[in-house]
Amino acid sequence: MPRQPVPLPHKSQAPPVSRASPIASFSASALAWRHFAIFTTASLPWMTGTAINPLFRSAYLAKDGDRDVTLVIPWLSLKDQELVYPNKIVFESPLEHEAYVRHWIEERISFRPSFSIKFYPAKFSTELRSILPVGDITEFIPDELADIAVLEEPEHLNWYHHGRKWKNKFRRVIGVVHTNYIAYVKREKNGQVIACFMKYMNTWVTRIYCHKIIRLSGATQDMPRSVVCNIHGVNPKFLEVGKLKLNQLQNGETAFTKGAYYIGKMVWSKGYRELLDLLSKYQSKLAGLEVDLYGTGEDSDEVRKSAELLNLVVKVHPGRDHADPLFHDYKVFINPSTTDVVCTTTAEALAMGKIVICADHPSNEFFKRFPNCRIYNSDEEFVQFTLNALTEQPAPLTDMQRYDLSWEAATARFMEAAELNLPISESRIHETSKISLPTFLKTRKLKQSLEDASVYLHQALSGLEVTRRAFGAVPKTLQPDEQLCKDLGD
């Protein structure tokens, strides 16, 4: 079986505590939250947000050495790996896979990451195009380390969860909502009906299994006990490119030699349809515009055929890593997508000092603070902003704007949004301060009884194979099969 070479693993040394770090400025009481277990729904080499962002989050939470962090990622059988991972990359063992992940992150940050990596058994659903957990994944963190659980995509992780209640296992459970599932399913056949059911299901499982929900933007559905906050940063390499481009501009050099581009998974729902429709509608006004599209996906052939029908020069290329030097010299990033929650490539383009043109949508709210982000509210504004961007120079990023895009800032925002920078005893004071003690105790007991009944119902439904199959679970995933157990050494 063809495979790419994978570096050998090594033992990581914990980095020295840096008191200059923004994270270290938190109250010492925050250290009561000692161990973080970060569960996510994907892993490299699948280049998706839920593979990349939790990996960076783990590295930066562990950076100062004040926290023990374990990243818990899915392990797939060889058969499923071949369906999911690009470029025929597969792994014979979790040890080999871990080495790949560590090598990737170490090439992108300036310090030696000190977090641990564990694997849980998983299966790939070709119908949902998603990786789903197998069995009770709470078991992969020992009880003595069950302090903070961060569930990256809590709804996804819990649709078919049948096992220990997260809130009973961990002292604090934080869900991070990455994906606008409702927007995606509405595009499918019978989408409105499915979206209504999914909205209810997402609310149900996050309510019973999470203490706090962080929604990356207002583009996601509202959730119980939720707050909207962008807790993602960018790969430091993009900020370095931005500094280089700023120096070139300040020295009077030509920093950007290419025009406009877009990069993203090449499926219509990622904004390609909207972009090609705009270019087709305003071909005469945009005469002379050249746009390069980079991506790989199920709709690549259709996107290419549609682009060839335009009078404008629109070239379609295979997907690449956005950090590739090929992208450094583009000046304008066009992103009309309205299905993202927070678009990682938009943040990366801003970090590299480019002008970004994107739609007025809740997913872009965080980027409005950056002068190089041009938000359009109409087709006419899209055309005007695009023409202006091709003739203007980007505004230089300030130190504060650069910091806002960093993972240091994102980690600080995470701690605050999750209420983990407060003493444990104070984390819920605001919920009880206006209620007399006897009333509060009665209300709390009633809520707990209702939640326990809700958990019981979910566990009963998720424990039946017929029910699981009816709602889209991969067959026979209540327990890991013999091959997954063998791979993981059970």
Image: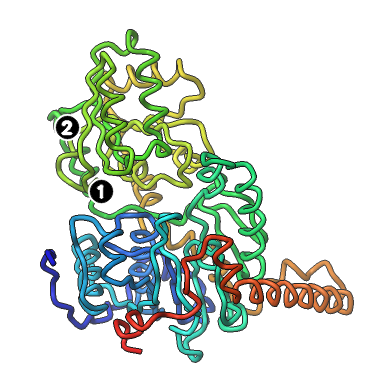
| Residue furthest front in the image | 466
Q: Which residue is rendered at x = 47% and y = 41% of the image? A: 339
Left or right of 449, for residue 160:
left
> Can you tell which quarter of the image residue 109 is in?
bottom left
Residue 354, above or below 453: above
> Can you tell which quarter of the image residue 485 is in?
bottom left
Residue type highlighted by circle 1: Phe
| Residue furthest bottom in the image | 144
Left or right of 288, for residue 419:
right
**Spatial distance from mark 1 to mark 2, Cα to Cα?**
15 Å
Name the residue that disc number 1 marks: 238
Q: Which residue is rendered at x = 26% and y = 29% of the image? A: 304
Where the C terminus falls, by quadrant?
Answer: bottom left
Residue type highlighted by circle 2: Ala
Residue 392 appears at what percent x and percent y? 28, 21
Residue 341 appears at what percent x and percent y? 48, 47
Q: Which residue is rendered at x = 29% and y = 82% of the image? A: 487
Residue 22, above or below 168: above
Image disc number at residue 255: 2
The colour scheme applied to this rendered structure is rainbow
Q: Which residue is rendered at x = 73% and y = 77% of the image? A: 452
Structural crowding at the residue carrying mark 2, measured as other residues with C-alpha within 10 Å and reported as few (<14), some (14–19) or many (≥20): many
Residue 156 appears at what percent x and percent y? 51, 62
Q: How many marks?
A: 2
Residue 223 appears at what percent x and percent y? 64, 56
Q: Nearer the viewer, mark 1 or mark 2?
A: 1
Mark toward the start of the polypeptide (1 vs 2): 1
- Give the camera-side residue of 245 and 387: 387
Left or right of 335, for residue 310:
left
- Give the camera-side residue of 401 and 216: 216
Structural crowding at the residue carrying mark 1, measured as other residues with C-alpha within 10 Å and reported as few (<14), some (14–19) or many (≥20): many
Q: What element does badge 1 sit on? A: helix
